[in-house]
Image (cartoon, helix red, strand yellow):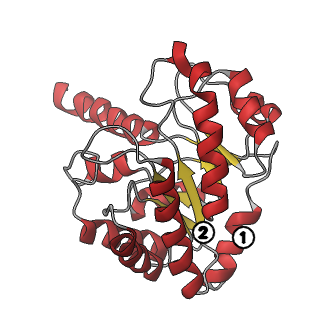
Amino acid sequence: MTQAEKARTFHALHKKGEPLVLYNIWDAGSAKAVAEAGAKAIATGSWSVASAQGYADGEKLPLDRVMRTAKQIGSAVGLPVSIDFEGGYAREPEFLADNVARLIATGAVGLNFEDQVVGGEGLHAIEDQAHRIAAIRAVADEASIPLFINARTDVFLKSDPADHARHMKEATDRCDVYAEAGASGFFIPGLTDPDLIARICSHTKLPVNAYMKDGAPSISEMAKLGVARISHGPGPYRQAMQALTASASEVYQN
């Protein structure tokens, strides 16, 4: 498949009630392992990619390494690849566009793009984030790649679960504005309340991406709520490292 064909395939995999399950990976080897397990698409998690190379999350991993890793993953598997691009390694739309153009050149067909101010406090103003999303869409259109822009809001991730209902209006407002700016999907990490997840799924035509974590509904339950995509974040990396530590411990203790 061409890159554009992979992008269209990736879009088509997002179906409300029949979610695309992404078991997030961190390098070419883990991508091949997950592909061999039956994955329909590959997605990185920024925390895992950074940790695997000795860095903290939050755009601490040098951008050149992000690009190299994305290229290696795309070369290792024939599936659509989406990259967790955090805040795009830039605040101003013009510099963000340059970075996204580089990412598209690696063969990636999707990206996660978050609204928290990386390295700062709080979230980008809705209007500012909309301009940033529009810049991503423009550079993707220029490249003739229907890039899947998974617009992530950190409204819930940064707040107490007891306050999540109170943040619903801001979340849906951001969803609407991001969609208008060119987002392809809406990612709501941190939200685990089934009723609130269902409300967001009902509110928007965008495919909604939920995050699998302790306390979250099961995959089958999320499907019933209308979720179209489920991410596992750093969980797979942590499990793999725990298994490696346990295996090594057996060797050294014998």
Residue at disc 1, secondary structure: helix
List x then y, in percent, for residue 76. 47, 72
Q: Are marks 1 and 2 in contact (CB under 8 Å)?
A: yes
The answer to which of 82 and 146 lies nearer the viewer is 146
97 with respect to 38 (left or right): left
Residue 210 relative to residue 83: left or right: right
Crowd tier of the residue under label 2, counting other residues whose Cα lies within 10 Å: few below 14, some 14–19, many 20 or above: many
- Give residue 8's position: percent from left, percent from top: 71, 73
Q: Quadrant of residue 128?
A: bottom left
Which quadrant holds the C terminus? top left
Which element is circle 2 on? loop
Judge whether 185 appears above or below 17 on screen.
below
- Tell me what residue is drawn at x 42 percent, y 40 percent: 234
Residue under label 2: 80
Residue at coordinates 47% horizontally, 38% vertically from top-left?
Answer: 154
Asked where in the image residue 196 lies, by quadrant, the reply is top right
Amino acid at circle 1: Thr
Mark 1–mark 2 distance (CA, rounded to whole Å): 7 Å
Q: Position of residue 157 (x, y in %)?
A: 46, 31
Residue 9: image tag: 1
Could you tell which of marks 1 and 2 lies nearer the N-terminus? 1
Q: Is residue 57 visible?
A: yes
